Amino acid sequence: MSYENEVKHLAGKQEPIPGRVDLGLMRYLWQAGPFSSNRQESLPKFLQRVSVLKEFSSNELRILSQYLHRRQFSRGEIVFRQGDAGYGFYFVLSGTVTIQHLSGREGDLKEHILAMLEKTQYFGEMGLLEDYNRRNATAVCGESTTLLGLFKPDLEALLDQHPVVGAKFMREISLILAQRVGALMQEVTHLRHQLDGGSTLK
Amino acid sequence: MNQTPVALRQQRSQIVFFGMLLLSGIYLLISFPRLSLPLASAYVLALILKPVEDFFWSLPRRHRFAASVLLATLVGFMIWPLFTITTTVGAEAQDLSVNFPRFEMLLRQKFIELRSVVYRTFKFQIDIDPVVWMATKLKTDGGALIANLPKLMGNLLEWLILTPVFTWFFLREGKKLKQGFLRLIPNPWFERSYMLLYQFNGRFGGYIMAKTVEATILGVILLLGLLLMDFPYAFLLGFIGGLTNIVPYVGPLLGWGAALVVGLMEPHGDGALMTMTIIYVIANFIDMALVFPLLVSKIVNLHPLIVVGSVIIGSEVGGLVGMIISVPVATFFKLALVDVHKSLYVENQK
């Protein structure tokens, strides 16, 4: 008996009508199963948890994940040094990364820890935008770390082959930069207030 | 900021492993030209076909089907004249080989005239007979060629079969192959090597495309000019002219040399050789003044002096093949040098 005839038959008898098979739900349950996940699928899933990519759909994340490079670093290994040429942007897939900055006069250089990055956090966005970027800080892996890198050639390929995803990614990068500039302005204002206060006291 | 000894040791191992792998790969490619030649030609073909493939994949499915039909029709229209020209070129080449004894006789006659002029003027007897020298050379080299012909034909057939297979493989699996290779690059070198390879690939692909277009334009100009003056073997000479143009600077001379031989073999009225030379000069002038600066030069972005220098070095190191690959190799070195220069000077100025 076809589904329609069965529904008619059951409706005539005033019996409860069985629900249709929800393919989307079935697919979700199948993919969410502990035995169905593999390395390829885990990347978009990981990207879903990255705050900066929250506006991306599952399909867009799947496309983006095809352009990412998985790089393995050991404990204490340097990802890049302050002053190095930079061409890439990284997401922390596992492990931790410390961002350090060296400042001061030659011979009296001091190391400042700027940030401790963990899983789903990101760094190095300027490397994607500037024509010849010089890294502003050093990135060191705190433990055995896996990073997902997106480099200039990948961004160009992404913009070329999937312009919508590429443009969306560029918008997110602009937002990160806007946030960084905002934070910097706040810090500058705070320092100026401190300086003004200091001069008034004198 | 120094790395931990463990990280340093791991990095060193990665560098040693990658270096050894790279050297063994280069050694294998140099040692087995039967493998490296189809690989190289497939790589070049894949670079040429990549934009077409990208364009197809960027289309929606129904558009892709329509575009496939359109492309097949276009390729058919392109292949048909190409097939006709190939048949004509083949027939002309066969005809030329039949007429070669006439050239030998003409050369001998010219030589006898020259010898008597030299003797009358300087009382000096020229002992070397160029015809005998040429015949001996042809016999020895030709004999070796005939002896090696089955092997050569086998290699050619192998190359013809392997190149499309490898090209398909490069187009289909190119991304995976590239990712596999990139995964092997040690972490400290990764970003720079990737960027350098990307820039070189772009320039190399552009160079191949530009040279193909340049050779076609030159070949067509020569063909039309030679056809207009009813010069013998116009199709063959146009084809040779376009083909030899791949070799920078020396190529046009080689093409003209072939036309000169044909002109001497088949005298074609007064001033035919001069007219033919003028056609070659005009074609090469158009190439040097318009096609090369607008197409090739902009893509490779090399100073003409560097191009000349690299061609000379290429000919010294690798003969004809060295001359052909000299410009892409020079492009690679320029990109690497610019990168090193930027890291040494631009970084410090910032």
Image (cartoon, grey):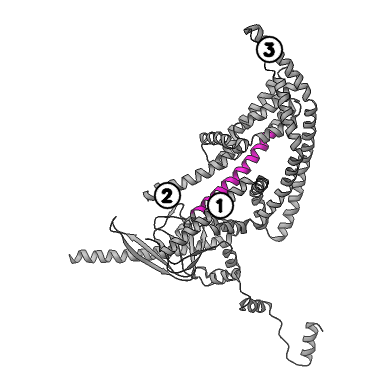
Query: Which range of residues does the magenta coloring cover?
Result: B192-220
Earlier residue among tags 1 and 3? 1
Residue B290 point in image, percent of width and height = 59, 34
Q: Is residue B319 left or right of residue B347?
A: right
Kindly report the distance in space between the C-alpha atoms of the residues bearing marks 1 and 2. 24 Å
Question: Is residue B211 toward the left or the right of residue B309 in the image?
Answer: right
- Horizontal side of A73 relative to B146 (left or right) equals left
**Amino acid, disc 1:** Leu
Q: Which residue is mark 1?
A: B22
**Magenta stretch, overall SS:** helix
* Residue drawn at point x = 80 percent, y = 82 percent: A2
Q: Residue A38: which quarter of the image?
A: bottom right
Q: Quadrant of residue B262?
A: top right
Spot occupied by residue B174 in the image (x, y as percentages of width and height):
63, 55
Q: Which residue is mark 3?
A: B115
- The numbered disc on residue B343 is 2
